[in-house]
Every structure is written in C-alpha cells, then in structure tokens.
Image (cartoon, rainbow, N blue to C red):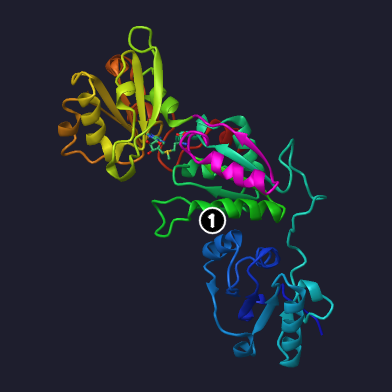
C-alpha cells in the first residue's frame, strides 16, 4: 500500500538513481533529508544541490542496497523500469515518477514544483529565465531597483565571492542559494560547471538570478555565461551594476576624469598571465588618462615597474583602494616611485582596485567617505539595513 513520505522520509536511508534532469527535479523536492546519489555522472545543477545539502555519491549496486528506500529517476524509461522490477522483487520501498501508480512511496504533496501556471513574477522575469544581475561594488544601497526586484523574485540564486552578505540578504529566505566563487571554497566551481548549471536550473523551470559583483560585463565573464544560455535557447536578460571603478572612485573622492588632469580613462586587467607582461604598456603611459587596474594587487610591483620603464613619471600619483564602498574601505596613496616600499608593512585585503594618474591628487581634498561617515550612515558590517529594507519593515 502506498505510504506518504511527508511524515516518514527522515526514517529512511534514501538512494536516488539518476544524475540528470529527472533526478534533479526529484531531488530538489526533497528538502533536508539524507540522500545518496547513484549515477555515473551528475548534471551541474544536481552537483550544486548535492554540495549544498551535504549529500553523498554512492557507488554500490542496487543489489547491495536491500532494505533501503529507492528513488528512481534515471532519465531512461527502460532503466527505470528495470530498477522498479528489482525493487518490487526485493520488497524495497520506492518512488519512481514514471511509474507513480506502482510506487510504494509518495512525495510530499505540499512541495512547490515550478509550472508555467504558477508564474507570478512581474515583467519579463518568467520561469525558465536567467537574469544576469550586477550587485554593485559592496554598499547594498548601490544596487539598482531592477536588481532588487530580480533578487526578490529569484528562486535559484547563484553568486560569486564579491557579492556582499547585505545584498544576499535581500533575496527571499526560501531561495536555493549556491556560492560558486573561489576564495571561500576549496573546490571552486569551474566556469563550464557554472554555465551548465545555469542552463539546467532554467530548463528545470526556475527563475534564476546569476549575481555578480560590480557589473557582470566588466571583467565578470558575464558574456561567456550568456553565450552558453543563448546556445541552449534559454531566455535571459542583463541588469547592469555599478562597476568597482565607478563605486570606488566616488567613495574615495577620486574623479576618474577631470579637465585639469585626465580626458580619458582606461579599465585594465592587472591579472597578468603567469606574471608575464602582455599589456600594451606604451599606450597605457600616454598623457592625459587615468588607469584603473582591476585584479592588480598581486601584480602591483610589475605594474609600477612597467609603467615607469615605458615612460611614466615616477612621481605619478597612485592609489590603492581596498574594499571600496564598504565600511572596511581603506585608501593608500603614493607615487609610482614609492608605493611598493610604503606598503611593505601593510596588509591589504582584497578586493582592491588600483588607480593611477594625476586625478589621485584630488583625494586629499575630496575624500568624504571614511569609517566615521560609514558609521553615521548606519553602516556596520553585517548589521546594515538599507532604507529599502527599513521601509519594508516599517522602520
Ligand atoms: C573579477 S573582477 C570583477 C569586477 C566586477 N565585475 C566589477 O564590475 O566591479 C574583481 C576585481 O574587481 C575589483 N573590485 C571589485 N569590488 C571591489 C571593491 N569593493 N573595492 C575595490 N576593488 C574591487 C578588484 O580589483 C577585484 O580584484
């Protein structure tokens, strides 16, 4: 006789057969249970879910799992049918969506499965859609209204290291949240895995937000992810964010252009391959421009050395702005000549942006945001509530 899993799932050792979309659809309905997965390979989204829930892979054959509970969703009808036959022959409790009427277990009835009918999100953010969203440089109040609305409607949220906790807190509590950044995780998710997971969550019918620090198209690999979605025929949109250069410049009082100093500005990656110098240093040292290096902290000495070797004045001002726009923002100023030595005893925390050019001189007169100001604006790391949140809570 069919048994309802709602009250009894916790008593079983659950084994899921399958690693593709059918298995994903089943697994994501289970909630916090202990589960072993049996599959030769897992799709990216199921792998994410497994990591997030702390589930394990199990290489044992079905025959070795007598007396346990099976969930059967291999994606192949014949294989499912064979597993169902084995389960019935061995009197094993099982659930197989393809063979629901023969299953001896039922899944909870109160789980929400995405369907087109249940599509309540506003505007163009429909089910099966990915929104590539820029989270800005750190201060949650620099989020755009559109980014906030996407976050609030998200069902799956895939984010990077640079997205602040304050911003993540704006997503609904029930959102499926996956961290795919590098620094906090020993096994960072390779880019192909992220691309695949985006496609699979969308194909499974979710509203997916891919949230990136700053702007997704500025040194953010947003283009690569969209190419994958376009190839798979997934609908997407892009919500721009305030890129670190603009946020950091504003919060440190260093205007990137100024008629007296710089008529153009260049955004440059400081992530130099194998420490080699593959930038066009001759054009970078042209007069009248501001240089902004992203990801340049580890290459600071090389950057400074190459700029001077290619004709930059050693007295050219340079600023390093760490954790810009947050309550932890710190600004270190110097010249190309002395900046490396001046930082010998200083520990600088990433993320840090490097600004080079005459405009840096304006810092001493125009800086306005410091820890005191941050505190007076209600900032406190981890405790910040934006005016939008306060309005929501009626504060
Ligand atoms: C992979 S890039 C991503 C840039 C991001 N897409 C953007 O538009 O800002 C990461 C680099 O951005 C810079 N960065 C990002 N946020 C920053 C912040 N709050 N303060 C200083 N630098 C920041 C750092 O140079 C960091 O190494």
Left or right: where 327 falls relative to 63: left
Q: Residue at x 77, y 74 (%)?
A: 77
| Residue in view at x 41 percent, y 31 percent | 325
Q: Nearer the viewer, residue 174 or 90?
A: 90
Residue drawn at x 38%, y 11% is: 258
In magenta segment, residue 362: no
Q: Which residues are magenta?
A: 213-242
Q: Position of residue 42 (x, y in %)?
A: 59, 66
Mark 1, residue position: 193
Q: Tell me if mark 1 has few (under 14), some (14-19) or many (20+) residues whose alpha carbon lies within 10 angstroms of its own.
A: some
Residue 274, given in percent of the width and then of the height, sits at: 30, 45
Residue 173 can be seen, yes or no:
no
Q: Quadrant of ligand 1?
A: top left
Q: Which sits in the foreground, 334 or 2?
A: 334
Quarter of the picture containing the C terminus is top right
Q: Is mark 1 within 8 Å of ligand 1?
A: no
SS of the residue under disc 1 = helix
Q: Where residue 366 sits in the image (x, y, percent)?
A: 33, 16
Q: Quadrant of residue 339?
A: top left
Q: Is residue 220 magenta?
A: yes
| Quadrant the N terminus occupies | bottom right
Q: Residue furthest bottom?
A: 90
Q: How many marks?
A: 1
Place residue 372 in its image quadrant: top left
Q: Give the image location of residue 121, x and y in percent.
A: 74, 42
Question: Can residue 388 be seen here?
Answer: yes
Given residues 375 and 165, the one toward you in this image is 165
**Where 264 sits versus 146, above or below?**
above
Residue 188 occupies which quadrant of the picture?
Answer: bottom left
Furthest residue in direction top, as rendered: 260
């Amino acid at each position: 006789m069919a048994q309802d899993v709602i009250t009894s799932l916790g008593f079983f050792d659950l084994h899921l057969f399958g690693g593709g979309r059918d298995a994903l659809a089943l697994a994501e309905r289970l909630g916090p249970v202990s589960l072993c997965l049996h599959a030769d390979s897992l799709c990216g989204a199921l792998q994410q879910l497994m990591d997030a829930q702390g589930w394990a892979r199990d290489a044992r054959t079905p025959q070795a799992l007598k007396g346990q509970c099976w969930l059967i969703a291999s994606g192949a009808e014949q294989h499912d049918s064979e597993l169902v036959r084995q389960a019935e022959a061995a009197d094993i409790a099982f659930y197989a969506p393809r063979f629901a009427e023969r299953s001896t277990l039922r899944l909870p009835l109160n789980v929400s499965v995405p369907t087109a009918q249940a599509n309540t999100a506003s505007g163009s953010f429909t089910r099966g859609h990915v929104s590539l969203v820029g989270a800005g440089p750190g201060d949650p109040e620099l989020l755009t209204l559109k980014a906030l609305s996407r976050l609030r409607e998200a069902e799956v949220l895939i984010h990077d290291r640079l997205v602040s906790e304050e911003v993540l807190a704006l997503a609904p509590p029930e959102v499926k949240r996956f961290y795919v950044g590098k620094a906090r995780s020993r096994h960072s998710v390779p880019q192909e895995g992220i691309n695949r997971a985006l496609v699979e969550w969308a194909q499974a019918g979710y509203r997916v937000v891919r949230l990136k620090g700053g702007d997704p198209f500025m040194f953010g690999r947003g283009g690569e992810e969209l190419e994958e979605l376009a190839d798979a025929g997934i609908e997407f949109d892009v919500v721009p964010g305030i890129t670190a250069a603009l946020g950091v410049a504003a919060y440190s009082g260093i205007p990137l252009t100024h008629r007296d100093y710089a008529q153009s500005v260049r955004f440059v990656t400081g992530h130099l391959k194998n420490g080699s110098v593959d930038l066009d240093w001759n054009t970078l040292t042209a007069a009248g421009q501001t240089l902004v290096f992203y990801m340049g902290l580890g290459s600071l000495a090389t950057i400074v050395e190459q700029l001077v070797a290619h004709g930059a004045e050693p007295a050219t001002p340079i600023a390093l702005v760490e954790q810009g726009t947050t309550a932890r923002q710190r600004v270190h100023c110097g010249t190309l000549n002395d900046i490396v030595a001046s930082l010998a005893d200083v520990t600088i925390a990433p993320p840090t942006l490097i600004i080079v050019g005459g405009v840096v001189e304006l810092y001493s007169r125009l800086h306005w945001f410091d820890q005191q100001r941050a505190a007076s604006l209600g900032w406190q790391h981890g405790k910040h509530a934006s005016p939008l949140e306060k309005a929501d809570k009626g504060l």
